[in-house]
Amino acid sequence: MTDQSAGLPAAATVPTGPRQRALSEFWHYFSMNTGAVIGLVVFTLLVLTAIFAPLIAPHMPDEQFRDSLLTPPMWQEGGKSMFILGTDAVGRDMLSRLIYGARYSLFIGLVVVVFALVSGIILGVLAGYFRGWVDTLIMRVMDIILAFPSLLLALVLVAILGPGLFNAMLAIALVLQPHFARLTRAAVMAEKNREYVVSAKVAGASHLRLMLVTILPNCVAPLIVQATLSFSNAILEAAALGFLGMGAQPPTPEWGTMLATAREFILRAPWVVTFPGLAILITVLAINLIGDGLRDALDPKLKRS
């Protein structure tokens, strides 16, 4: 008899690797959450907008049109087609400033999350692995930070360091750091006494290798979800500090700063407040929806057959 399988294409007989299967399973559960997919699409558009801002924006963000102060959006009476979303109190195009503002908000979120994630993981791994006085010292410091309202503590830190975008990012990162430290500590404690860790220890692995190579990779899933949610928190905190005059300083087209400079015109020209607020709302909502989808895809307890 002739082997029927001999005529099949080679690709059909090669099994999919474990990494490809894991990615396929991840996308399957992630895509089951419609809100997460919508959030991913919106966030992707925001990232592309931030990257290609010089090509997309109709004007420079600081360019002033002195003959078009507080011009309403183009669909309202008195609006102009060259200013789709209108202008602010000094004649700057709102759409251009919102587009360039996406760069600042996404950059703030990325820097804050990276700093908080790295420092939180280091502290959490040390506390969960060594326990004893190391754990007590680190966790008590984290508890003290968590005892204060996040925005209030960020305000105090910025007041000490001085107003500015960099100091605001540093303050927000320090405020968000305990969440990563506590989450990492709990995950390390759960994995520390498992068989594969004990086997690596018996085989002579060093403490550094056990912490970073053996244990930490198995604690990544909850940290990814927390990083996504912290990304949106960082954008909100930065906008709040900018609104209070402690974050990015004018004329930086950061959304919170735009709200601060426009609040006195909220009744006379509501669009100068509405559009930056909507930008913050849409961005934070999209990131939170992505976080929900990541939680569904990465948490085995939430996976459905």
Image: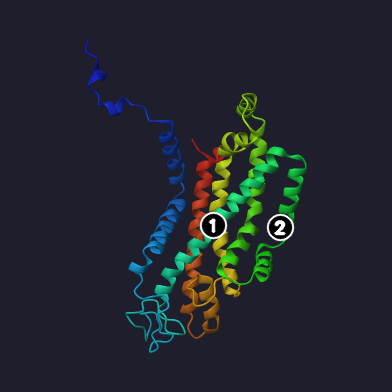
Kind of residue sitting beneath label 2: Ile
Return the mark for residue 2: none
Q: Is residue 62 left or right of residue 131?
A: left
Residue 92 appears at what percent x and percent y? 42, 80
Q: Is residue 53 left or right of residue 121?
A: left
- In which quadrant will I find the N terminus? top left
**Closest to the observer: 273 or 141?**
141
Q: Is residue 202 left or right of residue 83?
A: right
Quarter of the view holding residue 11: top left
Q: Is residue 237 visible?
A: no
Q: Which residue is mark 1?
A: 231
Q: Is residue 171 visible?
A: yes
Q: Earlier in the sequence, mark 1 or mark 2?
A: 2
Q: Residues within 10 Å of mark 2 (few under 14, many from 20)?
A: some
Quarter of the view holding residue 238: bottom right
Q: Is residue 210 above or below residue 236?
A: above
Return the mark for residue 145: 2
**Closest to the observer: 224 or 280?**
224
Residue 74 appears at what percent x and percent y? 36, 80
